[in-house]
Image: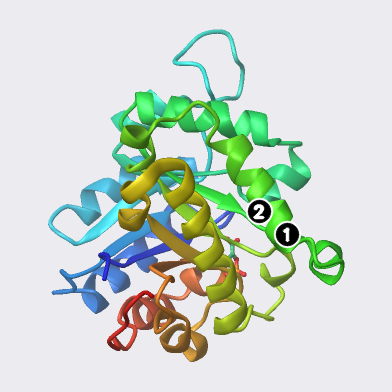
Amino acid sequence: MLRPLIAGNWKMNTTISQGVELVMRLRELTRGAEDIDIVIAPPYTSIYHLRFLLAGSPIKLAAQNLYIEKNGAYTGEVSAEMLRDVGCEYAIIGHSERRRYFNETDETVNKKIFASLRANLKPVVCVGETLDERKDNKTLGVVKRQIKGALKGLGPGMVKDLVLAYEPVWAIGTGINATPEQAEEVHNRLRDLLCEEYGMVANDLRIIYGGSVKPENIDELMAQPNIDGALVGGASLNADDFARIARFKKSPKGRS
Ligand code: PEP
């Protein structure tokens, strides 16, 4: 079993004081959770402050996005190097909200992965199909295309530092999660695809699931052989719920 990763994406929520309150409670509730990677992605404005509160806790910081250049005249943007400097260890890349509202494409996602690795940030690369695509039986084709585009030009040595997040768009923020079987089917196919392209390294790459993860469904999801963690939106804003997700019930699992 790979070391599980539970990541919370706070999106455009929380003031600094709200973030502090959330982190203080989370620290308390996750004390001693050493066999798992717990990551939170607060808004940029809170990261610097929260890094000091997280010192000595198992919780790591992620950015929700980044820009591809190191520095320069790109008003409003933040580089991977700046995010590393402020304390981030991970960066979420290609979230469906970025694709939908900010026109991100597989090509921009690819550039952001390179930027992220350049700065020693671990990319959490999101892929997933819309409801129409699922209804049209296009799920596997869509995620395959997204992966191929996102990972273009990356060798096995770079791919090993990635985390892949399968996030069906229809499950994000809707309260309707993919069933564990639906998610496992996609994760399994993604793992096969990565094995074909990159060899054994793909077996060590974490593929996490995102889309309406909550305390009520995490145990079943995590019992699937190819689900190595979760990317959590809404429920990560509630410390008790997020901590319960991070303390999911472990059950033995073996991949075929
Ligand atoms: C997300 O935005 O990545 C997400 C999974 O959101 P939610 O958990 O709210 O569905």
Residue underneath mark 2: 143
Q: How is the image coloured?
A: rainbow
| Quadrant of the image containing the N terminus | bottom left
The residue beneath circle 1 is 129
Q: Residue at x 68, y 60 (%)?
A: 140
Q: Are marks 2 and 1 in contact (CB under 8 Å)?
A: yes
Q: Residue at x 51, y 16 (%)?
A: 69
> Whole-Å distance between the Cαs marked 2 and 1?
7 Å
Pointer 2 local density, CA inside 10 Å: few below 14, some 14–19, many at least 20: many
The crowd level at tag 1 (other Cα within 10 Å; few <14, some 14-19, many 20+) is: many
Left or right relative to 74: residue 50: left
Along the viewing direction, whichever of 101 and 222 lies nearer the viewer: 222
For the residue labelled by badge 1, is the local secondary structure a helix, a strand or a loop?
A: loop
Q: Is residue 135 left or right of residue 9?
A: right
Residue 207 position in % (x across, y down): 44, 60
- Note whether ligand 1 is within 8 Å of mark 2: no
Specify whether residue 14 is in view: no
Q: Position of residue 252 (x, y in %)?
A: 27, 86
Ligand 1 sits in quadrant:
bottom right
Estimate the x, y position of residue 49 in percent, counting from the top left: 32, 45
Estimate the x, y position of residue 123 in percent, counting from the top left: 43, 42
